[in-house]
Amino acid sequence: MSSSVSERLAIRDAVEKKIELRQNWNEDDLQLVFRAAYNHIFGRQGIYANQKFTSAESLLRNGKTDVRQFVETLAKSDFYKECFFQSNSQVRFIELNYKHLLGRAPNDQTEIDYHPDLYEASAYEAAIETYIY
């Protein structure tokens, strides 16, 4: 049996499906993006997140930000900090950032080693931006 983890957990379609907000989107498309972002960034806590980010949702809905900036807002939020930064070791937090913001684990130890110095030198927000940009 060579089935992937996502196939064994019956989540293959959810894992492999890309969500994009294309031109001429409708409200259903936007809601799909919101749900996907909350689930991807916050995991189980995502069900609580949508009540906290109505202004960020409004900015995306009105074209004042794009999806990348919406994700950046989520990752820089106090809610994200509380859920992942304050309750985990620095290395675990870095691993979670790779998972939540890039959709993958760190490739090797050098990717992890890069970030602690960045947090020290540039602050939390600048470190988050390195994953997004």
Image (cartoon, grey):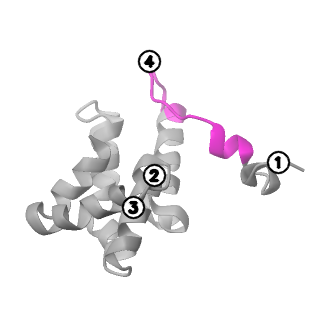
Q: In this view, which residue lies farthest toward the top?
A: 24
Q: What stretch is highlighted in magenta?
A: 12-29
The quarter of the picture where residue 100 lies is bottom left
- Find out whether residue 125 is within the magenta segment: no
Of labels 4 and 2, earlier in sequence is 4
Of labels 3 and 1, earlier in sequence is 1
- Find out whether residue 25 is within the magenta segment: yes
Q: In this view, does 63 lie to the left or right of 17?
A: left
What kind of element bears circle 1? loop
Q: In this view, does 106 lie to the left or right of 133?
A: right
Name the residue that disc number 4 marks: 24
Disc 3 residue type (three-letter): Gln
* Observer-nearest of 88 and 76: 88
Name the residue that disc number 3 marks: 109
Disc 1 residue type (three-letter): Ser
Nearest-to-viewer mark from 4 and 3: 3
Q: In the drawing, what numbered circle is on residue 53?
A: none
Disc 4 residue type (three-letter): Asn
Of labels 4 and 3, earlier in sequence is 4
> Residue at coordinates 17% horizontally, 61% vertically from top-left?
118
Name the residue that disc number 2 marks: 107
| Picture layout, residue 63 above or below residue 110 | above
Of labels 4 and 1, earlier in sequence is 1
> Residue at coordinates 30% horizontally, 34% vertically from top-left?
66
Do callouts 2 and 3 mark residues in contact (Cβ within 8 Å)?
Answer: no
Q: In this view, does 18 lie to the left or right of 98?
A: right
> Residue at coordinates 45% horizontally, 22% vertically from top-left?
22
* Observer-nearest of 77 and 123: 123
